[in-house]
Image (spheres, helix red, strand yellow):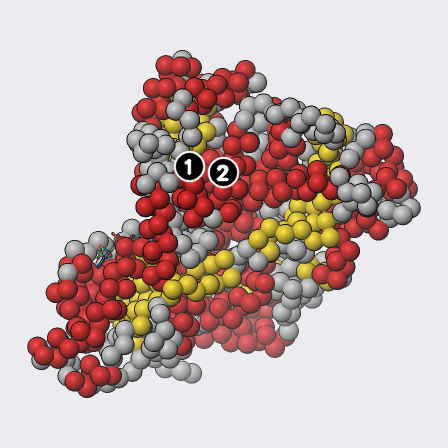
Amino acid sequence: MTSEKKRSIAVLTSGGDSPGMNAAVRAVVRAGLDQGVDVYIIYEGYQGMVDGGDRIVKANWDSVGGILHRGGTVIGTARCMDFRTREGRLTAARNLLQNNINNLVIIGGDGSLTGAHIFRQEWLSLLVELVERGDISNDIAQHYEELNIVGMVGSIDNDMFGTDMTIGADTALHRITEAIDAISSTAASHKRAFVIEVMGRNCGYLALMGAIAGGADWVLIPEAPPSVDNWEDHMCEVMEMGRKAGRRDIIVVVAEGAQDQYGNPISCDYVKKVLEERLGADTRVTILGHVQRGGSPTAFDRNLGTMMGYASVEEILNTKPDNDPVLIGIRGNRITKTPLMQCVEETHAVAKAIAAHDYDKAMELRGGSFKEAFRIFRTLVRAFPHPLPEGQKQLRLAVMNAGGPAPGMNTAIKAAVRLGLDKGHTMLGIQNGFAGFIAGEIKEMDWMSVAGLASMGGAELGTNRRLPKGSDLYTLARHIENFKIDGLLIIGGWTGYESAYLMYNERDNYPAFNIPIVCLPATINNNLPGSELSIGADTALNSIIWAVDKIKQSAVASRRCFVVELMGRYCGYLALMSGLATGAERVYTHEEGVTLNNLQEDLQMLIKGFKQGKRLALLMRNEDANSFYTTNFMSALFSEESHKLFDVRQAILGHLQQGGDPSPFDRIQATQLAAKCIEFLIEETKSEESPAAAFIGLYGGKVQFFEFDRFARMVDLTYKRPKRQWWLDLRPIAKIMSKPGPHPELTEE
Ligand code: ADP
């Protein structure tokens, strides 16, 4: 037994694997090394802790290089029976102490975290026993009398209390949505029905969100079984109406743990039988299975793993001995800490409520946004709208896009049109942004006019960057009057917001503008006030990392530096977040600025790195980071000054960033925000005074509205971005993660 007493942290992944675990491991290792402590990787979960020996390995900076994009967990995971016994945990404790470890970061599900909790509770008694057995000295036992643990949830199910998202759930949703999209196209070709089973024994998150994102017709989840006995009739009636209205495919999504209100399981085969017998539908069953767990993690899961891993190290190094261990979670882009066992207990409470058939409680425990999502889904799948309630005025609500195309615009239009029609109102579509509005390109939209739109990239209604000015305002006012528009929803980017702001300011001159107006943030640039994320940015980020992963692979055989140019105008969101997700060495943004000094330092960093054996460097540059130090300039500078030590190549990703089918996150958020906007417009038409003009957003984990009188104060009008941008706080993490690692084996120059 060694007598050295340096602080050490160990990290392990346990239970079911999930994409993004690698990012978390990488962040723990690098943040720990950056803090000057020893970091150990424990391979194969708790089994590695019990086995000891070469399963517990001291990590260096490069042990976790090149793993961000890989699925699963490269350090292995296992289900370990030994760790469930005291004898097993005793051996594990001895193995940890042999490496001076009493700080543990566990990445796993509720089972793994429960195991960690039990281990911590027993720790002192394990030490006593180890001393009695002569396995450790009194001195060691005294020095390491506390076991500190921190948990992170790696699970595709998103079933854990204490975090809005678990590491891996977003990637699983991508796999599910891709599958539903693919199945929908073949189903429509043959007019077939498909019953798709997705994972989730006690949690309908993947099924519900997959169904919303994939535009499915019906969903069965454990928390909210059909509330009537003859639910099969009701389901078939809705499908039949859908068919009559022109729908060619039928998609039913079933969670693994789906059941009826008495707790009897509802299997896919049963649903298939129902559809065949009652509708005569040619029905197939697809069980997605482990495909959902696999594959490269999404940008979100990589960055979530990185943020959580970094926060775990901060927590474990600063925790006081008496503090309860915490679970690191996320709520609205902010890291949260919640007592670990509270999270485990609340998570079990959902399973218990389901087992007791107390579904109201189960839904209550899942939280408000889950319930809301379920409600919206049920409205969207209805084949025909509800009639207008008696005594209510039928409104004419207009929807339009504005600004550059953003994936998810179509999804928002579909949701807005259907939800507006469902409330009994007339929905108008304004084509081609403000140019179309000025030209009077306005048409009525019916229920089926938006079918199939949810999963399509681009902007079917058209969009452009024209800002109304001068006599345009008069023309717009006339159209509002002639088309009897009672409320306006603008789905778009900066152009949309500026135009709405203009109309708001011109209300005194043009009384027609005194209608409720609401803007829904949709731009890949993510540069809008009032929303931490705008629709389209997540899709763009994923398109970027997909491209950059390939670019990186192309360069493995050579010493090459890539300068990758990214969109975003003056907003560095895409550059920073894609840099974080791909492990870029450097990110250049306009917010931070670029100086000649920076470039010289970066050049030295590159030269040193390549001399030490580096094969690839990645520099992410926001398109407007600096108007003089352009991508061309930087590439030429680094190339010339490298003196052939390494090649420099540019990759200007261009418009691929604006394309692509919207990601599940963008589809789900577009749907939820559109629903809120329609409700807002309807409410505001009742206003006695001047109706509101506002923009909606996701802010601090909540959906909020901001009145346009705050617009000018919230933004930097010159650079067209919000004054406060939350993601700038992630810069220190990006810098630490991408630092060239210390290479003690190589001599410094
Ligand atoms: P998950 O962490 O994904 O929920 P499991 O429930 O299978 O997965 O737990 C993973 C591992 O955590 C188990 O194989 C076991 O080694 C350990 N573990 C789980 N529950 C306990 C427990 N009550 N006591 C000790 N170890 C446990």
Give the foreground label among 2 and 1.
1
User: Could you tell me which quadrant the C terminus lies in?
Assistant: bottom left
Residue 17 placement (x, y as % from top left):
31, 52
* Disc 2 residue crowd, few under 14, some 14–19, many 20+, Cα 10 Å: many
Q: Which mark is residue 374?
A: 2
Q: List the residue tagged with mark 1.
A: 224
Q: Nearer the viewer, residue 627 or 728?
A: 728
Asked where in the image residue 446 lies, by quadrant, the reply is top right
Residue 652 placement (x, y as % from top left):
58, 53
Measuring 23% from the left and 59% from the top, which residue is drawn there? 44
* Disc 1 residue crowd, few under 14, some 14–19, many 20+, Cα 10 Å: many
Residue 110 placement (x, y as % from top left):
31, 55
User: Does residue 20 appear to the left or right of 403 in the view shown?
Assistant: left
Q: Nearer the viewer, residue 48 or 505?
A: 505
Q: Earlier in the sequence, mark 2 or mark 1?
A: 1
Residue 222 in the image: above or below residue 170: above
Q: Amino acid at mark 2?
A: Phe
